[in-house]
Amino acid sequence: MSDSSKKPDKEPTFLDKQVTRRNVLKYTGIGSLGALLGASSLGGVFAMTNQAPSKTGKADKNEIIPFYGEHQAGIITEAQNNVYFVSMDVITTKKEEVRLLFKEWTEAVALMTAGNPVGEPSTNHYMPPKDTGEVMGLSPANLTITFGVGPSLFVLEGKDRFGLKHKQPKELVDLPKFPFDSLEKEWTGGDLCVQACADDPQVAFHAVRNLVRIARGKATIRWAQEGFQRSKQSDPKQETPRNLFGFKDGIVNPDVKNNQEMDKGIWVQPDDGPNWLEGGSYLIVRRIQMYIEVWDRSTLKDQEETFGRYRESGAPLGQKLEMDPVNLELKDQSGKLMIPENAHVRLAKGDGKQVILRRPYSYTNGMDAKTGSFDAGLLFICFQREPSKQFIPMQQRLAKMDKLNEYTVHKGSAIFACLPGTSLGGFIGETLF
Amino acid sequence: MRMFGLSSVLLISMSLLFGCSANEQSPKKDTKSKETAAPAADLEDVTKAYREFAIGEISQFVKATEEFTDAVKSGNIEKAKELYPTARMYYERSEPIAEVFGDLDPKIDAREGDVPEEEWTGYHRIEKGLWEENTTKGYEEYADQLLKDTKLLRAKVETVEVTPDVLITGAVDLLNEVSTSKVTGEEDRYSHTDLYDFAANVQGAEKIYELLQSDLAKKDQALSEKIGEHFNQVNQLLEKHKKDGKYILYTELKRPEIKELSQAIDALAEPLSQLGIVMEG
């Protein structure tokens, strides 16, 4: 791979030409189509230079999130409109196959995020096309793919399945059981995760579909959930997105443009643990069903006291603006706390020491067949450097007394270590496998 | 019986073949048409061997059907129930050929609702009588008709010309059958003997793989080995669901077991779908 990936760098004119199978073969000297499709160089070069030759030749540079970098994309990337999240089980027993899977995935992602199909159009009509085809002619829509590994990849039922046990970070363990958790096995855990985000649901699904296809025989889907935010198109003021309870969600996020803040709270640092995860981050996902029918019949006062914010402005109770700092001491004339003891914002804030990067999406899965209510809620996704000091203490407080618990139930949960990024010629997971 | 019979696939692939040969005849040096027209490798021995295999299966299908229909006509319910799943396996194994005759396939293998009620005949019609109504009474005529249709199939199958693409699309089609109707328990909805059909479809696909194996290995050794490994995995999985030498009922499978079977078929069918590489010159 490294050989072929260097070649185009030396051939600056290569990028200017229309890429056909023939001249690629000429340049790379690879004789078989199979080998060509396995070469990551093309996507890589195009991603680096933003010269994506999409099917139409018109890929909008502004809709490409660079794939290569110190960190994986899709973490501090501004949340796209849609997510397709998949948790997977590894079924192969060979570590080498897992390593190869990540290499193949990296190649495919480098291509797709730059607006290219995962393989050249087929010339053999007796074989299925390499790419599934539903994004032909579409923009990459700011597609990002973020890969993570779960605790069970290291040790499953006491077994060191891939000889990776000694590399398992102490932070990468199953989350403790929180009070009132109502987790269902089919929505919990996983050896690997793939988070695909894009500003178009079809682009996000296409990416996941092709990655799952590449994984066939090596890994299978454990659970999958798609999610959405309001689209940016329908929100000209680009306000903080609202969840399905009608409240703004994710107001208190750290500033992703502040590198220091990100290093402090989001990215795993050199002294934190295993060096393979340096530059990575821990992803925690919770599938939280919302009893929206119940919520809809509670009073506005009740709703606002539940969150501790005003519904319309998003401002903390007792204050004016959304971005006003949360003041937990404020009292009304009768001496009652403005933000009640059990309000979500008070418990989430705690002593203010735990900061997480929230990247939540709403979901709707049609009707809950058992009750006839909507199956709708929040696919809560967050990133952090040390779960034991960030999400876990925060959730312990919330689970115990959050007033919001009356209207929600946590059905799914998983933790993954999101690998660091990679550079041209490398692959996601190269530090681990 | 499927919604999309193989015959349509055959037509499509035949027109592709014609397209190819036309290109080859033209003296143009257009590399593009050269690429689209993957010259078919000489697979004559393979197609001949497959033809013999399929005809052999269908001959045995006639025999097994005769025993089954005899049991139905003589009112021997237990015997008929015992013969039902295994008789069908010959048909399911040779489906790429057996299904070519679009008029006979529904008569032999249509499920309830696939065809208008008054036209519904064949194995599944009798299956419903045996398991739902626990009777053979009133099904004698269906038994006669089924045997007649089966014999007609045997006669017609002599005329089939087997081309390489029948094998290539057939192998994956057999597994697609498993994915869409066997693994869902819809094939044998009264007897729940779906695992027999499941196994037979897999065996039919494996036969094609075995016949193409040496040609495939010449093109891509690793792919050939991978397919072999996945056939083993599926076969081992199926073996797990046998009790006293017989497959358990579909309804005895637990949900995670069904998922496991389904995903094992996906894992096998993906590399198997690359079989077409043998057509490259």
Image (cartoon, coloured by chain):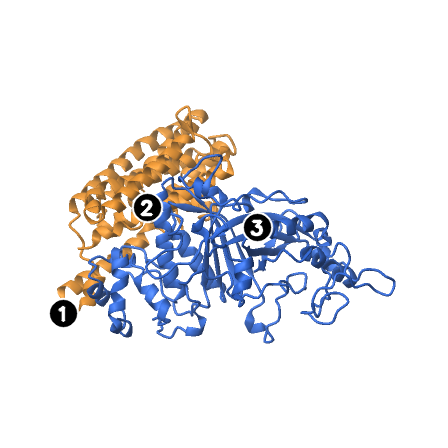
Residue A319's quadrant in the figure? bottom right
Q: Chain of mark 1?
A: B
Q: Give the amino acid type for the residue marked by disc 1 in the picture.
A: Lys
Apparent colour of chain B: orange
Q: State whether residue B250 appears in this view.
A: yes
* Mark 2 and mark 3: Cα distance apart in space: 58 Å
Q: Residue furthest right?
A: A334
Q: Do discs 1 and 3 share a chain?
A: no
Residue behind mark 3: A387
Q: Residue furthest top?
A: B244
Q: Give the amino acid type for the residue marked by disc 2 in the picture.
A: Glu
Q: What residue is drawn where x is 24% and y is 68%?
A: A10
The crowd level at tag 2 (other Cα within 10 Å; few <14, some 14-19, many 20+) is many
Image quarter in which the N terminus of chain A is found? bottom left
User: Closer to the observer: label 2 or label 3?
Assistant: 3
User: Closer to the observer: label 1 or label 3?
Assistant: 3
Apparent colour of chain A: blue
- Is residue A86 rendered to the left or right of residue A37? right
Residue A412 place in picture, x, y as percent: 58, 48
Residue behind mark 2: B99
